[in-house]
Amino acid sequence: MVKRAYNFNPGPAALPLPVLEKVKEELLDYHGTGMSILEISHRSKEFENVINDANELMRKIYNIPDEYKVLWLQGGSSTQFYMVPANLMLEGKPAEYVNTGSWSKKAIKEAKFYGDVNVVASSEDKNFSYIPSNVSFNDNISYAHITSNNTIYGTQWQNYPAIGDAPLVSDMCSDFLSRPVDIKKFGVLYASAQKNLGPAGVTAVLIREDLINRGKALPTMISYKTHAEKNSLFNTPPCFSIYVCKLVLEWIKSIGGLNEIEKRNKKKSSIVYGLIDKSNGFYKGHAEPNSRSNMNVTFRLPSEELEAECINQAKGKCFVGIKGHRSVGGMRISLYNAVPVEAAEEVAEFLKEFQEAHTQ
Ligand SMILES: *Cc1c(COP(=O)(O)O)cnc(C)c1O
């Protein structure tokens, strides 16, 4: 048996072990072709089956209505920061954004290249420790944009904001496929794969058909229409990444779909939040309780020295990736889909012992 780390990395992140085992098993001879999936043509029957299966699985797992397309694109979520406004911004109609952290800010910056942008709500006043409540969007806008999970700060929208006729767009990079979502609430959802869906290199985009072509003249590669018309095979896609995403989707289906995934995610995060809440203030959560993320748990210790020592001791336990982002400091434990419940239990036990060893 290979010794596996407890991987709490924020992204790229843990993948399900059965998926890695399947990749290994199929690597040298993909379905009797005598070639690896890494070597075959994206125009081959084998790869076409991979992308079609991935589409089908995504549709089933997310219960995606017929009027939506699933796209597999490159350039990460960061590329969607400009593809969304390039495709969706309409003459004379601003886009409205909610600023809940660094990723929102980056999305806002890119949108400004394409038109007027209004920030209708922000949690910057308290270092993005909460999701603004009672957010409302104006009528007559091109679209509204939120970041459903704020990876760096550890906050997550619990209820999506209401919106009129304009499409709601979400950067769902770090909580994609982590819970059931009513897809109809959204016009566009995007998520690069490396947090919950698969390896880096591919970005899933779920888009309502009427938004694929708003009649704008665009360079070929940044137009959603190009990719939608060609089943994401206009140019060479990241075949291997899409293949691994397909295996992850199969894994999600095999364990019981998004209801089971959500149950496990809630269980993991409640184990770690429970430890924080019972620590008499030794561990201080960054996110306000009603904005807490089930994906990224962020907290501080009483001093930076203790934080450094805790991270150092964690290494000896094979806990990887628990250092917080510099804009929050402290620790961040990412509990994406592929992180087992046992890992959350182990890290909570470690933190409990660390506290006991460092309080009189
Ligand atoms: C990681 C992340 C991104 C950036 O994704 P890239 O694939 O690196 O472009 C964007 N938004 C959120 C919420 C993220 O967590």
Image (cartoon, rainbow, N blue to C red):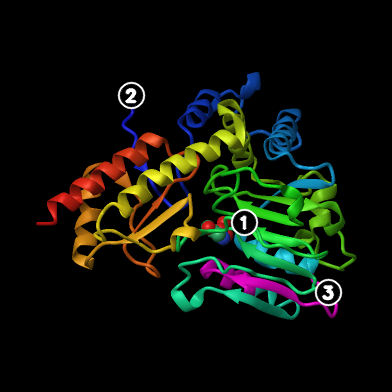
Residue 218 position, x and y percent, is 82, 67
Mark 3 lies on residue: 140
Whether 128 is among the magenta residues is no
Q: In the image, what residue occupies the spot 69% across and 40% down?
A: 62
Mark 1 lies on residue: 159
Mark linked to residue 1: 2
Question: Which image quadrant for residue 277?
Answer: bottom left
Q: Nearer the viewer, mark 2 or mark 1?
A: 1
Circle 3: is it few (<14), some (14-19), or many (20+) Cα within 10 Å? some
Residue 337 makes an appearance in the image: yes
Residue 148 position, x and y percent, is 59, 58
Mark 3–mark 2 Cα distance, whole angstroms, equals 59 Å
Q: Is mark 2 within 8 Å of ligand 1?
A: no
Mark 3–mark 1 Cα distance, whole angstroms, equals 23 Å
Whether 103 is among the magenta residues is yes
Residue 318 makes an appearance in the image: no
Numbered disc total = 3
Q: Secondary structure at mark 2?
A: loop
Q: In the image, what residue occupies the spot 24% across and 57% down?
A: 280
Q: Say if 329 sits above or below 38 in the image.
A: below
Q: Which residues are magenta?
A: 89-109
